[in-house]
Image (tube, grey):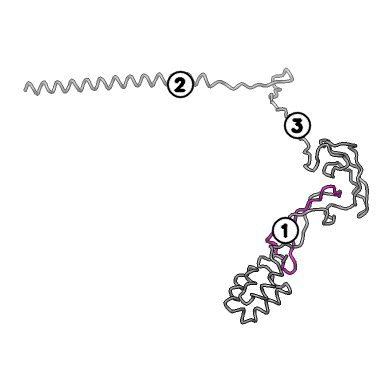
């Protein structure tokens, strides 16, 4: 009995010690939390400063106030003039083309007649001789010039040249150097489809006459389906071969990609 009694007293003592430790820890945590909360409150009170409004007034009257605003001052720098690539430095002024000159064209001149125009070499172009030039040119717009006076971009390969009526394509054209004209020197022009892939009419005709029974002429022109049919039918027993010779001779049959013969 004494042993049981001592055991119970020991268990009671342990429980009391544990409760004391827990209560001490709880009080310590509570005090730390309160102190941190007070610190945060004081910091917020310091940082939450009232907004300062800056205002000026022309009059001494307190009712008339105008806000002080700041407008940034923008400094614009002039864009330097770009010198065209066709304007070499220290060339003779009279050899410079229209892209290097500022000309006062007379748009009321008589079409097709030669007229004079007064020009001045552009400021950033360096040349030898007088910078004031007088040039003669035929009165017409740039797009009205002869084809020898301008160059155009190559035809698009998707343009079919064997359609009826003939198709056209839009090409970008540029006037040649030293050619004077009115209006823009770069323009668009609608031209007929006219391009080739390297097929020769003489080669196609020779193959049709000699090896047409085996479809070699059709193979040469890129017409694979017709060529295989011609090959396995032995040239349509000769009838197909004769017909192809005539059609190639008159130019009715051409390359499969729609291009022209050389």
Mark 1 falls on what kind of element? Answer: loop
| Mark 2 or 1, closer to the camera | 1
Q: Looking at the magenta stretch, what is its main secondary structure?
A: loop
Residue 165, x across and y down, in percent: 75, 68
| Mark 3 or 2, closer to the camera | 3
Badge number at residue 155 = 1
Vertical arrangement, residue 166 with respect to residue 59, above or below: below
Mark 2 falls on what kind of element? Answer: helix
Q: Is residue 142 left or right of residue 19?
A: right
Badge number at residue 82 = none
Q: Label 3 neighbourhood size at 10 Å, few (<14), some (14-19), many (20+)?
A: few
Vertical arrangement, residue 43 with respect to residue 172, above or below: above
Pointer 2 residue: 40
Residue 250, x across and y down, in percent: 74, 74
The magenta segment: 155-182
First of labels 2, 1 by sequence position: 2
Residue 102, x across and y down, in percent: 86, 41
Give me the residue at 64% from left, 75% from top: 212
Separation (CA) of disc 3 from disc 2? 53 Å
Pointer 3 residue: 77
| Mark 3 or 1, closer to the camera | 1
Separation (CA) of disc 2 from disc 1? 78 Å
């Amino acid at each position: 009995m004494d042993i049981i009694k001592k055991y119970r007293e020991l268990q009671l003592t342990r429980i009391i010690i544990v409760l004391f430790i827990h209560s001490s820890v709880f009080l310590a945590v509570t005090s730390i939390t309160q102190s941190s909360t007070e610190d945060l409150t004081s910091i917020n009170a310091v940082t939450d400063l009232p907004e300062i409004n800056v205002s000026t007034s022309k009059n001494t009257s307190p009712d008339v106030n105008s806000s002080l605003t700041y407008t940034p001052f923008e400094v614009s720098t002039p864009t330097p003039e770009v010198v065209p690539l066709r304007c070499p430095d220290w060339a003779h002024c009279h050899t410079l083309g229209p892209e290097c000159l500022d000309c006062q064209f007379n748009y009321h001149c008589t079409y097709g007649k030669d007229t004079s125009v007064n020009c001045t070499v552009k400021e950033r172009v360096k040349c030898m001789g007088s910078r004031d030039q007088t040039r003669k040119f035929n009165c017409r717009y740039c797009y009205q010039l002869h084809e020898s006076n301008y160059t155009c971009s190559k035809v698009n390969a998707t343009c079919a040249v064997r359609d009826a009526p003939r198709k056209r394509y839009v090409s970008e054209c540029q006037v040649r150097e030293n050619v004077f004209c009115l209006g823009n020197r770069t323009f668009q022009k609608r031209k007929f489809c006219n391009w080739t892939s390297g097929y020769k009419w003489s080669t196609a005709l020779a193959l049709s006459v000699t090896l047409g029974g085996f479809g070699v002429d059709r193979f040469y022109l890129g017409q694979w389906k017709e060529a295989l049919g011609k090959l396995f039918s032995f040239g349509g027993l000769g009838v197909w071969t004769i017909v192809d010779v005539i059609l190639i001779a008159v130019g009715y049959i051409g390359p499969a990609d729609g291009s022209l013969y050389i």
